[in-house]
Amino acid sequence: MTSPTRRTFIAGSAASAIALGAPAVHALGANEKLNIGLIGSGNRGRTISTECVKAGHNVVAVADIAKFRLEYISSELVKAGGEKPTPYDDYRKLLEHKGLDAVIIATPDHHHKEQLLTAMAADKHAYCEKPLSHTIEQGKEMVAAVRKAKKIVQVGNQRHSGEHWTRCREVIQSPDFGQLVWVKVWDCRNWIKRDPFAAPKTFTEEQQKGVNWDAFLGRAKKRPFDPVRYWSWRWYWDYAGGLMTDIGAHQLDIVQWLGGVDVPVSATANGGVYFFKHWETPDVIHGVWDYGKFTATFAVEFINGYDGVGATFYGTKQTLHCEAQNGGLIRLYDSIDKPTATTKPTESWKVENETPAHVRNWLAAVKDNKDPSSPIELGHRVITAAHLANISYRTGKKVVWDAKKEQIVSG
């Protein structure tokens, strides 16, 4: 990835017109531990923060708008070998914690912009979970704020820290692969059997009373407390962009990164709410992007898990097929014909869990004063493609994108 000292920017980013200087951070010794604060202690916040502890750093403070989550995350961090963190019911108070170096932002999407901008103003480094932004305009503001603050920010597109994907990129960009003409990515899961984001039966009345609902809503439309919205916020337009942004942040990352492109020329999408009737965002959605050099398609639904998670890259000389779940396998075929039961791949390699490497990449980047593997511009570019598809879905029109102006020119 590009170092800030080289003063280069990724084409089409919101920061393309901003002069980039080296991040203003104090030099850290090789053995010096970072003091980290966690904002939002749900599943991803717990995973990322415990990885920081496992990597030898301190999670000294946690902030959440729910009391029961604060109690649980404290015990999990201690269990992972860390110290008991100081709890806060307001992330702004956490940012005043003495000696704090960096924060993890793992809250619902509609809070990311305000919390990241506040962290930049407080002179803290940050790990911001994907999807980076709730809208394209918010993403532009976030890129500008990070570069103005000159802080190290990692966006949670963790596939960018997977060595197996780096190897895929080398294959696809090689002359042996030929011309890439189509990328097909998908994510299919069976949530009829079990919805992990449904309000649990153990969500007691006492726990509900301990949720600061006004803080959860933030700038979103005011409404009475709703346990379904609280747990399943990803599927409501007020707080997130549904499957397209939540899963597209990963699948569109490998489309653009491995395909060697920055942003699409156009996007279209179709879908609907067919089974999970409490969802506002579609539970089945298909997107199509024209990248000028090739077309990408993304199919995602959480009703039927038959196809699992994967990607196929179609070249004019070779084919690369990826089964992306942990323990999955990536296969390269020196052919553009349909493989038979006896067809053997030319090469194959395993898919590993990228999150530990992504967290360590961020920690090292902070200490070394350089951009991480998924800097703010990259996170913004990837989620812009997903936002464009959602705009197409909601308007029923094909959306044409001007990357230089960062604006929709048609649709």
Image (tube, rainbow, N blue to C red):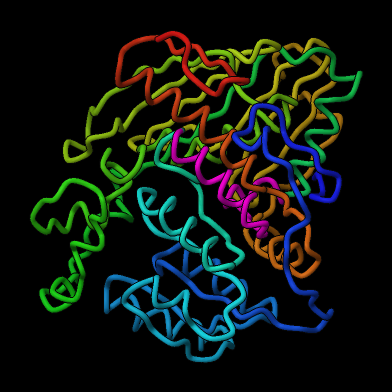
Query: Horizontally, is 127 left or right of 287 in the view?
Result: right
Count of numbered circles in the view: 0
As for residue 59 lying within the magenta part, the answer is no
Q: Residue at x 46, y 26 (%)?
A: 299
Q: Residue at x 72, y 50 (%)?
A: 373
Q: Residue 358 in the image: x percent, y percent?
A: 67, 58
Q: Between residue 348 and residue 205, name the one nearer to us.
A: 205
The stretch of residues the image draws in magenta is: 137-161
Query: Horizontally, is 116 left or right of 207 in the view?
Result: right
Q: Residue 250 in the image: x percent, y percent?
A: 56, 40
Query: Horizontally, is 53 left or right of 276 in the view?
Result: right
Q: Residue 216 in the image: x percent, y percent?
A: 25, 60
Assign the N terminus to one quadrant of the image: top right
Q: From the viewer's perspective, is residue 97 above or below residue 238?
A: below
Assign the C terminus to one quadrant of the image: top left
Q: From the viewer's perspective, is residue 152 above or below residue 273?
A: below
Where is residue 323, by image quadrant? top right
- Among all residues in the image, which is located at the extreme bottom? 83
Q: Dominant secondary structure of the magenta stretch?
A: helix
Q: From the viewer's perspective, is residue 279 above or below residue 273?
A: below
Q: Between residue 238 and residue 90, name the one nearer to us.
A: 90
Q: Between residue 199 and residue 115, name the one nearer to us.
A: 115
Q: From the viewer's perspective, is residue 264 above or below residue 305?
A: above
Q: Residue at x 13, y 56 (%)?
A: 226
Where is residue 290, by image quadrant? top right
Where is residue 396, by image quadrant? top left
Q: Residue 35 in the image: x percent, y percent?
A: 61, 80
